[in-house]
Amino acid sequence: MNTQDTYQNTIQFAAQQHTDKNQTIPGSHLPYVVHLSNVAMEILVASEKSENFNTEFAIQLALLHDTLEDTDVTFEELEYQFGKAVADGVLALTKNSDLEKSEKMMDSLRRIQQQPKEVWAVKLADRITNLQTPPHFWKEEKIIKYKEEAKIILEELRGGNAYLERRLGDKIKKYNCL
Ligand code: NI
């Protein structure tokens, strides 16, 4: 399959799953698929700037990255529909709900570090996308914490994708001024 067909198939699947859960972008009425397509857009641009980058694999990861965390899709279903590498990558990008809140991010980052660089790239792209103007109901403390988390993600995923690391670094700098 080519990138365009892969994108179409995958976004349809992901959009349906998130829509079935009535999921919207936090702080807005926009459907969640807007977030997914933003992450995929970051990945597509990054793929043009990166060597040895499996674009189709990364696009699938980008569009599916929140399905295990936020929808009823199972690992087995992802594996059946998209293959083991994609399912493994999405699982690494999924927080373990059995852990304490404070441990969830580092645990996921450790698992991402065991995965191909495309998985690292999707985590970077996810946070780049999320460093827009924060939802209006976020308190200052939460905004500061989110920015600190972004710095940890950038440090832990150094070497994942040079282009996206630069993008995330710039976003972190500007996040203060929003
Ligand atoms: Ni996300």
Image: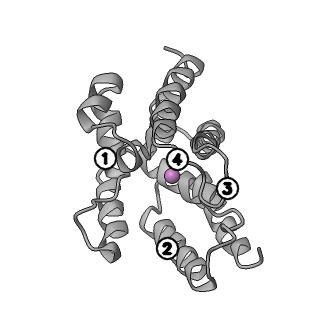
Select label 2 or label 3 by which is in front. 3
- Labels 4 & 2 near each other (Cβ < 8 A): no
Q: Position of residue 7 (x, y in %)?
A: 55, 25
Which is more N-terminal, label 1 or label 4? 4
The foreground one among 145 and 172 is 145
Counting every numbered tag in the picture gives 4
- Which scheme is used to colour this image of the protein? one colour
Q: Position of residue 114 (x, y in %)?
A: 29, 52
Q: Position of residue 98 (x, y in %)?
A: 22, 64
In the rendered image, the quadrant that contains the C terminus is bottom right
Looking at the rendered structure, the kind of residue marked 4 is Gln
Residue located beneath label 2 in the image: 149
Residue located beneath label 3 in the image: 28
Which is more N-terminal, label 1 or label 3? 3
Q: Vertical placement of 120 versus 155: above or below? A: above
Q: CA distance from mark 2 to mark 3?
A: 22 Å
Q: CA distance from mark 4 to mark 1?
A: 20 Å
- Labels 3 & 4 near each other (Cβ < 8 A): no
The answer to whether the beta carbon of the residue marked 2 is less than 8 Å from any atom of ligand 1 is no
The foreground one among 16 and 58 is 16
Could you tell me which secondary element the residue under label 4 belongs to? loop
Residue located beneath label 4 in the image: 23
Could you tell me which secondary element the residue under label 1 belongs to? helix
Residue located beneath label 1 in the image: 91
- Labels 3 & 1 near each other (Cβ < 8 A): no
Task: Judge from the rendering whether residue 149 lies leftward or rightward of residue 96; answer left or right.
Answer: right
Q: CA distance from mark 3 to mark 1?
A: 27 Å
Select label 3 or label 1 by which is in front. 3
Looking at the rendered structure, the kind of residue marked 2 is Glu
Query: 10 Å neighbourhood of mark 1: few (<14), some, or many (≥20)?
Result: many
Q: Position of residue 177 (x, y in %)?
A: 77, 78
